[in-house]
Image: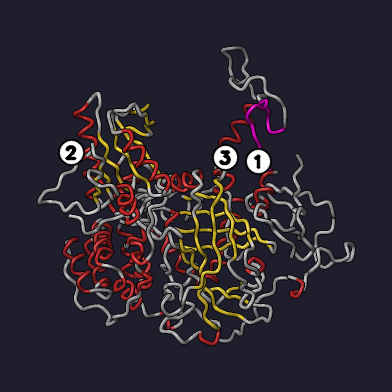
Amino acid sequence: MGVNLDNEKGNFSSNNKGSVNSNAKQEQLDQFRVQNTGKPLTTNQGRKISNDRDMLKAGERGPTLHQDWHYFEKMTHFVNEEIPERVVHARGYSAHGEFECYQSMRHVTKAGFLQEAGKKTPLTIRFSTVQGAKGSYDTARDLRCVGVKLYTEEGNYDLTTIAMPVLINQDAMKFPDAMHAYQSKQDDDIPTASGAHDLFWDYVANNEEALHMVLWIMSDRGIVRSYRMMESWSINTYLFVNEQEKATFVRFVWKPVLGVHSLLQDEALKIGGLDPDFHRRDLREAIRKGAYPEYELGIQLISMEDEFKYDFDVLDPSKFWPEEIVPVQLIGKMTLNRNIDSYFTESEQVAFNPANVVPGIDFSNDPVLQGRLIAYQAAQLHRLGANFQELPINRPLCPFHNNQRRGNMRFRIDVDQVNYHKNSLANNTPYETPPEQGGYSSYPKKVEGYVIRNRSESFKDYYSQPRIFWNSLTPIEKQHTIEALSYQVGSVKSESVRQQVVDILVKVDQEMSYIVADNIGVNRPPGTNVPVSASYPSLSQFSTPSYAKTQKVGVLIGDGFNGQEVKNVLAYLQENGIFIEIISEKLGAVTGADGTKINVDKTFIIASPYLVDSVYVVGGNSGYQAKFMQDVSNFVHEAYKHYKPIGVASSGQPYIQPSENNNLAGVVFAANNPNFEKDFVAAIGQQRFWDRV
């Protein structure tokens, strides 16, 4: 099978203005996909192997021989199978999909993939955490990042976003400091996937610009329920440039169609031990079942003339652009519709860089963005080598030609001998392409001033927006944030650092700082919060929609159940796109009173109330009835404690009873309820019942 390394497949012209169909990337990757099943074992050079079990020895009990070329190839490849780990974003997971443009954006940008409604562009996405190493766990309270690589007809466009609209630093010079403080300590490499330690909070207390993003991480946004339910922002300010060379400031946001939802802190900590791969498993399972995750792409636009119009600096990455002031316009939708085949090849080797843009998208003077344009390229060269762009997952779909040569793992076989510009021997090719024919040209923005290391005074309002964020949270979200601060800062050993933290928290909210101070054993801080009363509904997760679709229901069941009732309920749940997990005493099948058999997915030993979104209590009989009843009761108790919807079959009523100590909010009973299925689905759609006692 030949590999077309020149990418000249499709209808591309020399100026990369041809078309890209939505399956083009998968068709390209198909050239690199290899099925080993049913094939003879060979070396990497194609030599067939007769014995892959024993090393070559001098006699059966003798020493091994240096000439064992097969062992040498096999073992040396094994010890070199891991590439250097990403210094941040090490733990991640990927999927494939497509982006569909809703409407032409040609009035603000000449980017080809945004020129016409209905245009589809293939893409690869990678979700990741920041603090933890590759072997850490998914549900840690952390900043989550998203890299989307769109394979456009004009080249690869990498749109990188994070799960909050503000960044921890205002200048790229400080990013290494923030990450050194955030990651595990040098002496003991502890903690893993957590910022709950002295160095990080010492950094926050002594670098005021860090507090804003840290508050977002301490809110429910820091422990997302699923990658499928995670909003993410570009943070940085880019430029849209149209055909008339008119520029507009732009920020991007991905809005999940399923809404924005989170775990509780207790759930996130427990799931980290029960299923470290919770988020990647959830993503993969949803795609496998055809419940394709969807995200709408929103843009916020500010004209160049209005750069100084607002009470925030449009170039400050530690400040958000309020949607109520700078509206979000939805311009397209991303659908993730295919799982990766190889984690290493399609996720570990994928390389993102915000400098990878296409004509019509350019860079503002955002000081963090300016630094990122260099940092990502250097990181990929370190991890993957000089030719990382030739790896299948990173290759553009359009043709690419230049005078770069050699380097580790060079795939291309460049048959021409002239590799410099300008030249006469090759007619001065590869040639430059004028902007009017699709060549990239930078926006001619005006630059003036002295060469200086300094920061704009307009960046130095560190507390107004954190105060607005706090004002915008619901009482439940505020309580969760206080609990997170108490847990994280309470883990700090230095009393001085704990005191310094509450001394800056008071500038956000006095009452909140007092509660945290009392919880972590330090003095209540002097002073009070900044006098800002503004709030924006868009900053609260409670303003986003919630659905029953793709929520996971744990069905607690034994033998002897009402077969018709349970079959009707399960069928209705599936009709509404709800995922079902049958949980019982042992694997195999449970049998109803009428002979109905239902296959069991998990036993109580493996299953957990933390790993499902709601519970359907059927009950029944078991060979170990006392233990079965205890397991069901424990499951129900934990689900109830975490405000999850609970459906109770007619046979499940003994497991949950009203009393003075509960109000059974969100508990739906099947007995004497002809609308049970609908009521239960409605409860599942609500997801949490915060008024439960």
Residue 33 image label = 1
- The kind of residue tagged 3 is Glu
Q: Is residue 509 left or right of residue 252?
A: left
Crowd tier of the residue under label 2, counting other residues whose Cα lies within 10 Å: few below 14, some 14–19, many 20 or above: few
Q: Residue at x 34, y 67 (%)?
A: 540
Measured Cα–Cα span from mark 3 to mark 2: 55 Å
Residue 407, compared with residue 650, is above or below; it is: below
Q: Residue at x 59, y 31 (%)?
A: 75
Q: Nearer the viewer, residue 154 or 611?
A: 611
Most common secondary structure along the magenta stretch: loop
Residue found farthest to the top: 60
Q: Which residue is mark 2?
A: 654
Magenta highlight range: 32-45
Residue 280, compared with residue 563, is above or below; it is: below
Q: Measuring from the top left, give residue 679's x and y in whole percent.
A: 30, 52
- The kind of residue tagged 1 is Arg
Figure quadrant of residue 108: bottom right
Cβ atoms under marks 3 and 2 closer than 8 Å: no
Q: Is residue 34 magenta?
A: yes
Q: Which residue is mark 3?
A: 81
